[in-house]
Image (tube, rainbow, N blue to C red):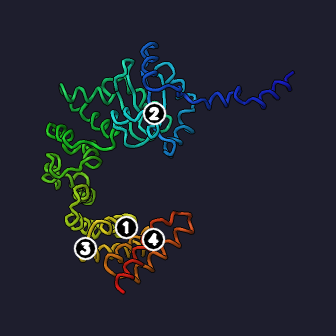
Amino acid sequence: MMKFFLFLTLLYPIYSEESIKQEIIFEKLNFRDAQTKAKKEKKGIFLNASADWCTPCIWMDKNVFNQTEVIESMKDRFVSIKIDFDKEELALKEKLKIDSYPILLYFNSRGELIHRYQGPLNKEEFISESNKAFNPDQAFYSLKYKYDRISLSQKLLYQYILSYHKAWGYVDNSILDSYFSKEKDLYKEENWKLLDSYLTDLDSFTFILFKEKRFQFQKRFSKEVVEKKFLLTQMQYHSKKENWDKYAKIAFEYAEKYLDNDWKSLDGIAWKLAEHSEDKNVLKRAEFLAKKSIKLEPNFLNYETLAIINLKLGKLKESHSSITTSMNMAKEIGESLDSGIEILHKILNKIFETK
């Protein structure tokens, strides 16, 4: 009899303990039906915004949403659904401002959005983030409501800044301004973490304060750390504003001071200027950075960058040599050759134009 039972278990693994553990927590409901069920059962709604091509989404399916602890933590509190917003509910996608995947959204039983998290989480992080949904001092939209309509203590304002970044992937610098305009202990460790992680706007009160006090920050956190942040903030701002001449000036200073052994950052700056600048003097300096990157760590990325720069400088022979090297390297490690082929076509077109 025991052997027969084991035989059935092998034939029908759906009944095994392992297969039960693999059960996904999501119900096959659209958002409207999930609202109806949540209201009836007095539960919240957890919505996993995903797409079938999204690698982090697939990772969470295989490593988070099938875990017993996750299923147990969610089943009595939420009606959980997953929507591929590339295929369905496009109006809801626009309403919820879904522009990347995964985005984890939490609603109360009335269907009101209470918490949001952007990006993948491991099992422990997901359980922790889900627990915040019904905590008014941690749920993003609860903090947002208080910030917009009432006020927040410095402690909760700090929490709101962290929550804002988790929800949207950036922080509105006006919120940093609200915090730092009231902050008395400016040079404590957690304040530096805010500046270092989220300050991006040169026109903000916070950047002006940082610029004014940066020598005091240097005494507390070291000259190099503070100066790196000071230059990087300017680079990020000018890049976003597409002020490429100003970006180049700061980027070259940053590279000269801090990137002697960082091939990736050297290549990143050179590539950005290769893509956006037409200034020959800027491109010549970008060429120097690309060659320095190659000397440190030759790979298909920095050879491709050098090819683009040489093409813009009219060095067609050098450009052809660089892109050929790049494509050979890419082929060896299974990378796409599409961009290399595109650059080759541009080189050939330039050659024919000169004849």
Q: Secondary structure at mark 3?
A: helix
Q: Is residue 325 above or below residue 73?
A: below
User: Residue beneath label 1, please?
Assistant: 267
> Which residue is more in the foreground, 333 or 29?
29
Whole-number angstrom distance, CA of label 3 to CA of label 1: 14 Å
Q: Amino acid at mark 3?
A: Val
Residue 309 percent coordinates (x, y): 34, 74
Give the quadrant of residue 44.
Answer: top left
Whole-number angstrom distance, CA of label 1 to CA of label 2: 36 Å
Location of the C terminus (image quadrant):
bottom left
Q: Amino acid at mark 4?
A: Glu
For the residues carrying marks 1 and 2, which lies nearer the camera in this image?
Answer: 2
Q: Amino acid at mark 2?
A: Asn
Whether the residues at callouts 1 and 4 have beta carbons within 8 Å, the answer is: no
Q: Secondary structure at mark 4?
A: loop
Residue 283 percent coordinates (x, y): 28, 74
Q: Residue furthest bottom?
A: 355
Say which label, 1 or 4, has the lower sequence index.
1
Location of the N terminus (image quadrant):
top right
Whole-number angstrom distance, CA of label 4 to CA of label 2: 40 Å
For the residues carrying marks 3 and 4, which lies nearer the camera in this image?
Answer: 3
Whether the residues at callouts 3 and 1 have beta carbons within 8 Å, the answer is: no
Q: Residue at x 51, y 21 (%)?
A: 75
Q: Residue at x 34, y 26 (%)?
A: 114
Q: Is residue 118 above or below residue 310?
A: above
User: Residue beneath label 2, please?
Assistant: 48
Say which label, 1 or 2, has the lower sequence index.
2
User: Residue beneath label 4, please?
Assistant: 297
Q: How would you rate the neighbour count of disc 3 (Cα within 10 Å): few for under 14, some for 14-19, many for 20 or more?
A: some
Whole-number angstrom distance, CA of label 1 to CA of label 4: 10 Å
User: Residue beneath label 3, please?
Assistant: 282
Give the quadrant of residue 353.
Answer: bottom left
